[in-house]
Image (cartoon, grey):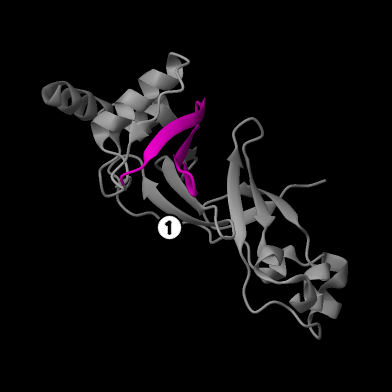
Amino acid sequence: MIKLIAVITATAAFIPAAARTAADLFAAAPAAVIPTLAANTRLDMLDYFRSGLPTASANTLDGKSRITALADDAVDVQIGRDSSMQLVMLPGRSDTIVAIVETVLTPIADSSIRYYHASDWSDAKGPALPGKADFVEPERSKEARTADMPTFIFVRAEYKPDEHIFVFTNTTAAYYAESDRPDGLALMRPVLKMKYSPKKFTPVSK
């Protein structure tokens, strides 16, 4: 089994990036990129999902994980009860970019994104998550300058493969008790739909 995994991983490394799918990259990713799931576990997870089985697989956190959705350019994984991950293929200038979107679901849903070059899994530069200013309604930006805005925000990121966009949900309100919420939260949009580019996320035109 170990030899088979090595052969599959080595073979996947030489498949041209343009011809690879998110499932290929999910299987071939180094342990440093997806440390919570061993390589053979990822192969099992793909087999279970493709076979329509609800079987969960052990992760390195002593929990159970399973794939919840699979598209050509994205793999959705429920890492555990309180966390999830997406592996997303994105267009780059000379190489496909792999984004690893990790989301902690409790106590407040919050995401982070890491970027890698698909050809060699080296670190890649990529846009940061939207900040407070991005969520403020454009016509209310003047009000926001003097409003009681939250000191920081929590953002959940999800890639939608059918639309090839990212959806960013502002989950900051859950951090506050109803009576303590800053007035500036009312100036902020709950959701942003944005397209990826190597330098920034751009709002989707209405």
Left or right? Give the position of 48 relative to 84. Answer: left
Quarter of the image where one finds residue 124:
bottom left
Q: Nearer the viewer, residue 115 or 132?
A: 132
Q: Is residue 69 visible?
A: yes
The residue under the point 72% across, 53% down is 192
Locate the N terminus by quadrant.
top left
Circle 1 residues within 10 Å: few <14, some 14–19, many ≥20 = few
Q: Is residue 3 above or below residue 183?
A: above
Magenta span contains residue 82? yes
Query: In this figure, which residue is indicated by the disc labeled 1?
Result: 125
Could you say where residue 39 lies in the image, as x and y percent from the top left? 25, 34
The residue under the point 78% across, 47% down is 205
Could you say where residue 153 lies in the image, as x and y percent from the top left? 63, 69
Three-letter residue code for mark 1: Lys
Q: Nearer the viewer, residue 65 or 122?
A: 65
Could you say where residue 94 lies in the image, as x and y percent from the top left? 41, 43
Left or right? Give the position of 193 relative to 158. Answer: right
